[in-house]
Amino acid sequence: MKGGNKPIYVIGHRNPDTDSICSAIGYANLKQAHGVNAVAARCGKINNETKYALEYFKVNQPLLLTDLYPRVKDVALECKTVVRQHDTLRHLGEVMRKSELQSVPVTDSGGELVGIVTVSDLAKRYFLELGLQSLVEMRVRYRDIIQATEAKVLVAGDENELIEGNIIIASGSAFSTVSILNRKDIVLVGDRSAETLLKFLECGISCLVVTQNSRIAPEVLEEAEKKGVFIMLTPYDTYTVGRLINQCVPIRRIMKSDPVCFRPMDLLSDIKGIMDKHRYRSYPVVENGKLVGLVSADEIMLPEREKVILVDHNERGQAIEGIEDGKIVEIIDHHRLGGVQTSEPIYIHQEPVGCTCTIVANMYWDQDVDIPPSIAGLLMSAIISDTVLFKSPTCTPKDRKTAERLAQIAGVDLKEYGLAMLRAGAGIGDKTPAEIAKNDLKEFKIGDYKIIVSQISVMDPSEILNIEDNIIAFMKENCEREGFDMHLLMATDILEEATYLLYVGSPRTLIGEAFHKDTSGNHIFLPGVMSRKKQIVPPLSEAVKRIKPQ
């Protein structure tokens, strides 16, 4: 719920790889060391390679965020003022007067929301009062009258008993009052003679409310005791007592049951229309039936944006859904600039190295912050992954030197661990053709074309080529459904240091121009190619300048 020190989410790209996850964890930990409320997050499923690294170094997966769109939880306020459904209107009026609220949620004794009551509901009740209201159907108890009128009980009965008669004001003669009395009625009376009060008792009434602390003769009290009739003494005048008794009605009798309410995870964009339709000042927020807060129609207009630090990417197409509704405060990355716009200057740290975690690790050392062994292990894992154990052309001497230093801190053999981790992530396992096609997926805008480039590492490329037709079918369907011009899948052979590039869409001439290959089939073989960032995207970006628009 709104309030407190909101976190800054450190998050990588969609379809996260090991660098995306580990750089988020590592950089969040560095920010925490400086007292920042940073939380590592992810916006996709973790792959087998990353899972191996997390389990090996005993680190939990980052928080899963599906999007940054503002939700009810971001603007909801803690609800400190509630009433129970059996509370009286008098209690409600006091609550509203003290809290200055226009509407108050109503709960049952277990805290579950059962309704909401507004000032207009209360005003309507009073406006309709043309006389004393019947309490027979309202399930009002004698204790409610005692509390409302601040009465002193002179002759007691069962205070929890429900009222069964009408309220009668003895304003006329004793004769006229007796003529309208019925059994179980409640009589409001001022300073009257003992003879008159005894006549009222003879009619079988259930309660005598004596106003303005008027004197009551002993014989009246004795007779009331014999007949089991309540006698109450109140300091208020008869008119005021009548109004107070009208306020004994339980709140549930005037509340709006089944009120319009929202859940913490509801999108603000989804509830605005509902608010415009009903035009209430505030709405209950419930979770599993329990009241957890209130959302104000005024607050929804200016929600505080979620603050995010982007790691391992800087392109909007690769960022978490709703990034436009978040506030980017930093970018830590090793890719090309991709056009993310910010509302104000921010801190950006980009270097032409093979892995974002290389940057993060050196930031620890530059800032003289010790790296915990588990974090060092994850940062090292990401460098191994992105550089394919230093075989990728993206690998720099800084990557290797950083990984070696991190391995010492983590207490592992760099090559032995690296091969085990790559082996855990290689191969298709039980992945479906759709999951293979979307593995480590990134979106790019190359020239005027929207292109997806996925990548999967394998020890045996035949795993992919044997089901190529099924993978290609999904890639075609995905392009049509999502509106992309092309979908490319890199099936990278770790042992042979080569890639089989599967492709669908148009223009196919872009593939042929970029890699100087015959593109009449569904894949081409690219020896020595292992890096999407350095060996796939740059040739495509150059080729698009040379081909004619389709």
Image (cartoon, grey):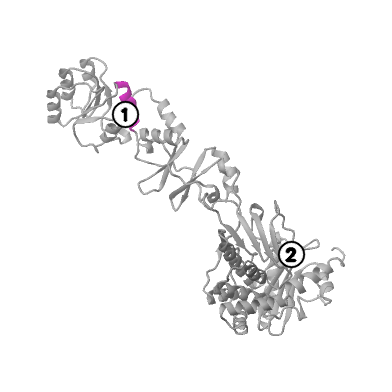
Task: Decide whether residue 242 is among the magenta residues.
Answer: yes
Position in image of residue 109 (x %, y %) = 35, 46
Residue 139, compared with residue 202, is above or below; it is: below
Amino acid of disc 2? Phe
The answer to whether any part of residue 261 appears in the image is yes
The alpha-carbon separation of the residues under discs 1 and 2 comes to 72 Å
Position in image of residue 498 (x %, y %) = 73, 81
**Observer-nearest of 400 and 540:** 400
Tell me, for residue 245, which label it has, or none: 1
Residue 282, compared with residue 152, is above or below; it is: below
Residue 358, compared with residue 287, is above or below; it is: below
Classify residue 31 as left or right of residue 245. right
Position in image of residue 86 (x %, y %) = 34, 40
Amino acid of disc 1? Ile
In which quadrant of the rendered view does residue 340 lie? bottom right
Where disc 1 sits, the SS reads helix
Q: Quadrant of the C terminus?
A: bottom right
Q: Residue at x 44, y 53 (%)?
A: 288
Decide whether the magenta segment is chiefly helix, strand or loop.
helix
Q: Which residues are magenta?
A: 238-248
Q: Residue at x 70, y 69 (%)?
A: 475
From the image, tell me which residue sits under label 2.
444
